[in-house]
Amino acid sequence: MQEQLLTCFVHPPVASNTFFVSLEGIEGAGKSTQVKGLVEYWSDPKHGNYRVITLREPGGTDFGEALRRAILNQQTPLTPLAEAYLFASARAQLLVEKILPALLMPNTIVLLDRYIDSSLSYQGEGSGLGIDNILKIHSIYPLYFIPHITFYLQITPELSFERQLLRQQKSTTIPTTGSGTSDYFERQSVTFYRKLAQGMTKSVELFPERIRVIPGNLSVDEVFAAMIEQWELFIGGGGRRL
Ligand code: TYD
């Protein structure tokens, strides 16, 4: 069943020397910091002089940003199916409006801050809808397009929880799981983060070629170096494998 579902997934059409890349990680994995470094690296003439387009999920389109606000400001729990379809709708719109057209430009890297592995992990495992149901939702155009390479910044659920408490302490005096300044997913318990980490591990098992696991507990520079090492291997190996 799962094997058959996996056959739906393909890389999107791309212009010459153009790549679709995503960055994944549970809360507090350090994605935002690394996005900046990657953009600088790839834009450098020494490292490909790529046109780099970064997009975040959910968001990136007017519709996606509206959904983002709706989901993250949600106060009562959403049913897992509603959650999954909300993220999927934002993603479908982003693909058609932004990602697919950008990939038709030569020498371009489209970098997504979160993509399908977030749905597999958060809705599939965290919220309990099941990995197969997420795969099914993504078996329809344009959701079956997957990145050429994904960097998964892996941290333990405990470190994720710790980093979030720190973040909340900096922005509010209430470092609890109460309303504070935290969003819908940041209000969850450490048990939820454990499920997220398990979900990401399942994603890696499903897409072992595409997803490169990067230890996220290292320093910013070390994490960056590990990503670049994987990128060089990917490019050296001809790139673009499922
Ligand atoms: P954001 O503030 O961008 O989180 P982060 O900086 O950690 O990326 O909020 C996005 C939230 O949405 C994040 O908690 C993960 C969640 N999410 C899902 O649950 N499913 C999805 O498919 C995506 C793309 C995000």
Image (cartoon, rainbow, N blue to C red):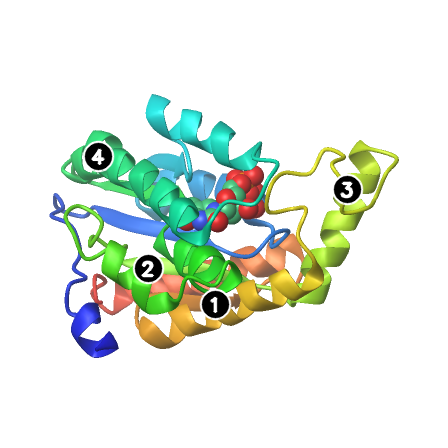
Label of residue 199 in the image: 1
Q: Quadrant of residue 95?
A: top left
The residue pinned by badge 4 equals 102
Q: In front of the other: label 3 or label 1?
A: 3
Query: Closer to the camera: disc 2 or disc 4?
Result: 2
Vertical arrangement, residue 106 with respect to residue 9, above or below: above
Screen quadrant of the C terminus? bottom left
State the CA–CA distance, disc 4 to disc 1.
29 Å
Instruction: Give the amino acid type for the residue marked by disc 2 in the picture.
Output: Ile
Determine the image quadrant of residue 240: bottom left
Query: Which residue lies most toward the right here?
Result: 173
Upstream in sequence: badge 1 or badge 2: 2
- Comparing 162 with 211, the one in front is 162
Taking the image as drawn, is residue 203 in sight?
yes
Q: CA distance from mark 3 to mark 4?
A: 40 Å
Q: Earlier in the sequence, mark 3 or mark 4?
A: 4
Mark 3 residue's CB less than 8 Å from ligand 1: no
- Marks 2 and 1: in contact by CB < 8 Å? no
Residue 6 % position (x, y):
21, 70
Q: Earlier in the sequence, mark 2 or mark 4?
A: 4
Whether label 4 touches label 1, CB < 8 Å = no
Residue at (33, 73) in percent of width and height: 206
Q: Which residue is mark 2?
A: 134
Q: Could you tell me which quadrant the N terminus lies in?
A: bottom left
Gap between marks 3 and 1, in whole Å? 25 Å
- CA gap, disc 2 to disc 3? 29 Å
Tell me the element at label 1.
helix
The answer to whether mark 3 and mark 4 are in CB contact below 8 A is no
Q: Using the rendered image of the protein, determine whether residue 217 is visible from the camera's viewpoint.
A: no
